[in-house]
Amino acid sequence: ENLPLLMGMIYLDPNPKLKDPEKAIKYFEEQAQRYPNSKYTADATAQKAQALIDLQRFDEAQKVLDGFLAGNPTEEQRVAAEFSKAVLLMQTQKLDDALNAFRAVRDRYTGTGQAEAAAYYYAQLLLQKGDAKGAIEEVKGFIARFPNSEQLPQAYYLQASAHNSLGNK
């Protein structure tokens, strides 16, 4: 019941000898066609969107994610899809929309890895948009909420960059 999903995942492997997002998409579509009511089909749909993002086919990815979220995904699937959508908005330079999307993931799905990553990206985008003071406050909050985060070194660097942009030493 999940063989097409697993086959598609093989082709999303970061190893360049295996990575082939086009093949992955075909398997994810096969999953949806053969097993439309399977719990694995939702995962295949989310992975298809990620493969489209990897291929920089952003409009198609947006449609897949919107359709997926309009369905009835589990909470875990919903947070992954909403986070992917926020990343998509950031990659397409829709920064205001990305900020809103990252803030929503951060605030709605506390305790998830996506909420942690969203908090970091939110601060990063604030700095990118020129709001260094806001970025500093967000990084402080990130450090307080996620003191054991793997992104802590990047957060400290982001904080230093924000202070530097304000002329603080």
Image (spheres, rainbow, N blue to C red):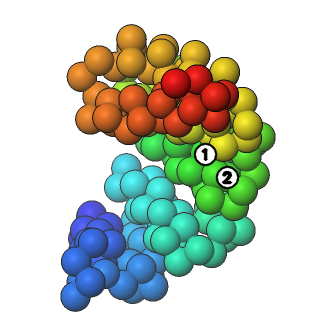
Question: x, y (%) of residue 69?
Answer: 61, 45
Q: Quadrant of the N terminus?
A: bottom left
Crowd tier of the residue under label 2, counting other residues whose Cα lies within 10 Å: few below 14, some 14–19, many 20 or above: many
Above or below — where is 56 with respect to 102? below
Residue 158 in the image, given as x and y percentages of width and height: 48, 35
Q: Which residue is mark 2?
A: 89
Q: Is residue 146 visible?
A: yes
Res. 23 image quadrant: bottom left
* The disc label shown at residue 86, or none: 1
What residue is rendered at 73% in x and 46% in y? 95
Residue at position x 53%, y 36% in the image: 161
**Residue type, label 2:** Leu
Residue 136: % across, % down: 57, 21
Judge by depth and name the residue closer to the eye, 4 or 106: 106
Image mark for residue 9: none
Looking at the image, how many numbered discs can be counted on the residues? 2
Q: Does residue 92 appear left or right of residue 54 in this picture?
A: right
- Along the line of sight, the residue nearer the viewer: 1 or 109: 109
Left or right: residue 107 versus residue 76 is right
Q: CA distance from mark 1 to mark 2?
A: 5 Å
Q: Is residue 133 left or right of residue 87?
A: right
